[in-house]
């Protein structure tokens, strides 16, 4: 996918660089720290690849892909403040360097820039899709916040959270390509399903890796979710399958009373012995297959191959 959209992505990056500028020097400085910080540009690449799949030959998707990246970056800036994170993509977070107020305000600036780009595109349908995704992401973050430090949220609520905070933007990023290419509703829905299922698979893998990886691989410290009391699927499964003693441990850990390195090592051993990571990754493969199946109606070619490969890569990161 990277090779497929490389030329388009350079044009998107030019829009991003141009639109993150401000007469207030702190804004491009802080935004650039994250935007130039080694991100994969996964979401804008999905917009570009979807447009390529549909044979779209215009250039509207470049600005819209930039809008998608601004929405994503704004949510990351806000997330790191909410979570109190110290590392993002292997670098110190913006909130650690410049403080929480600056991170929140620059996040607001980037959200505003994304809406400027949408309005300039002129399509009310595009505006509706991306503004709805922005609202859903915020709902997902609030849902996650109210579920924090609780072990009893269950798999269904967990999937609601990741469906909102991660998958909604993947889905919107793909869907808008069908709108600008003026394709039928069925193709819009198919691309939405591709992005949504890929997003869920992507987040499931991220949540599994948190218990089996390190900062070098992850770009964040292993165990961050554990210390922040996030009941991700590996924890939900390990808790459900654990002994009474294990459950006491998980409850205390999610409430923040068991957060040492030794506690994290114990959590990893419980997750391994209960096969919680294996089963989380099996679910990721399931959603990945659903994403691939959603492309079934589109003609074969380089774009479709790249989009299938992107799903396989997203799932294979854990191995």
Image: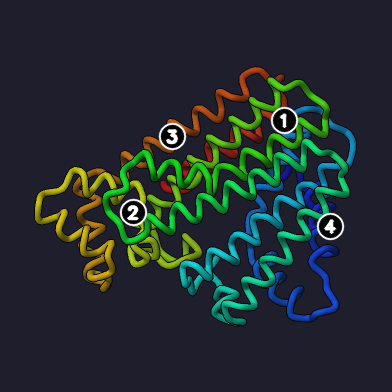
Q: Earlier in the sequence, mark 3 or mark 4?
A: 4
Residue 261 left/right relative to 249: right
Q: Indicate the position of residue 52 as horizontal and vertical percent values.
A: 78, 33
Category of crowding for the residue at label 2, using alpha-carbon neighbours closer than 10 angstroms: few (below 14), some (14–19), many (at least 20): many
Q: Judging from the image, what secondary structure is the residue with disc 2 in?
A: loop
Q: Judging from the image, what secondary structure is the residue with disc 4 in?
A: helix
What residue did someone put label 2 on? 231
Q: How many marks?
A: 4
Q: Earlier in the sequence, mark 1 or mark 3?
A: 3
What residue did someone put label 1 on? 302
Residue 6 left/right relative to 231: right
Category of crowding for the residue at label 3, using alpha-carbon neighbours closer than 10 angstroms: few (below 14), some (14–19), many (at least 20): many
What residue did someone put label 3 on? 285
Q: Indicate the position of residue 264 as horizontal and vertical percent values.
A: 27, 65
Q: Is 240 rendered above or below residue 33?
A: above
CB within 8 Å, label 1 to label 4: no
Q: Judging from the image, what secondary structure is the residue with disc 1 in?
A: helix
Tell us which disc is closer to us: 4 or 2.
Answer: 2
Residue 96 left/right relative to 3: left
CB within 8 Å, label 1 to label 3: no
Tell us which disc is closer to us: 3 or 4.
Answer: 4
Residue 195 lies in quadrant: top right
Q: Earlier in the sequence, mark 2 or mark 1?
A: 2
Which of the colour schemes (rainbow, by chain, secondary structure, one colour) is used?
rainbow
Distance Cα–Cα, label 3 vs label 4: 34 Å
Q: Is 158 rendered above or below residue 291?
A: below
Q: Judging from the image, what secondary structure is the residue with disc 3 in?
A: helix
Distance Cα–Cα, label 1 vs label 4: 25 Å
Q: Is residue 31 visible in the rendered structure shown here?
A: yes
Q: Earlier in the sequence, mark 4 or mark 2?
A: 4
Q: Indicate the position of residue 178 as horizontal and vertical percent values.
A: 76, 30
């Amino acid at each position: 996918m990277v090779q497929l959209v490389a030329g388009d992505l350079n044009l998107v990056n030019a829009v991003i660089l141009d639109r993150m500028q401000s007469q207030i020097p702190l804004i491009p400085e802080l935004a650039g720290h994250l935007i130039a910080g080694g991100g994969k540009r996964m979401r804008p690449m999905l917009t570009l690849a979807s447009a390529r799949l549909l044979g779209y030959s215009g250039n509207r998707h470049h600005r819209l892909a930039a809008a998608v990246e601004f929405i994503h970056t704004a949510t990351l800036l806000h997330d790191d403040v909410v979570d109190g994170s110290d590392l993002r993509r292997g670098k110190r977070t913006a909130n650690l360097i410049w403080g929480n107020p600056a991170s929140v305000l620059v996040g607001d600036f980037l959200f505003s820039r994304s809406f400027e780009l949408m309005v300039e595109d002129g399509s009310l349908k595009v505006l509706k899709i991306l503004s709805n995704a922005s609202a859903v992401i915020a709902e997902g973050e609030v849902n996650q916040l109210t579920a924090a430090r609780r072990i009893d949220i269950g798999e269904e609520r967990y999937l609601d959270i990741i469906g909102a905070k991660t998958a909604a933007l993947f889905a919107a990023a793909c869907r808008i390509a069908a709108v600008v290419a003026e394709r039928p509703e069925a193709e819009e829905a198919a691309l939405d399903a591709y992005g949504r299922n890929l997003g869920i698979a992507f987040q499931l893998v991220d949540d599994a890796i948190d218990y089996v990886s390190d900062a070098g691989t992850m770009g964040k410290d292993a165990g961050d979710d554990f210390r922040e009391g996030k009941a991700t699927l590996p924890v939900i499964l390990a808790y459900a399958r654990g002994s009474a003693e294990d459950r006491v441990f998980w409850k205390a850990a999610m409430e923040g009373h068991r957060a040492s390195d030794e506690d994290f090592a114990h959590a990893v051993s419980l997750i391994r012995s209960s096969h919680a990571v294996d089963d989380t990754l099996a679910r990721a493969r399931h959603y990945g297959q659903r994403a691939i199946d959603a492309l079934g109606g589109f003609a074969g070619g380089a774009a479709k191959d790249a989009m299938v490969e992107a799903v396989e890569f997203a799932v294979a990161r854990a191995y």
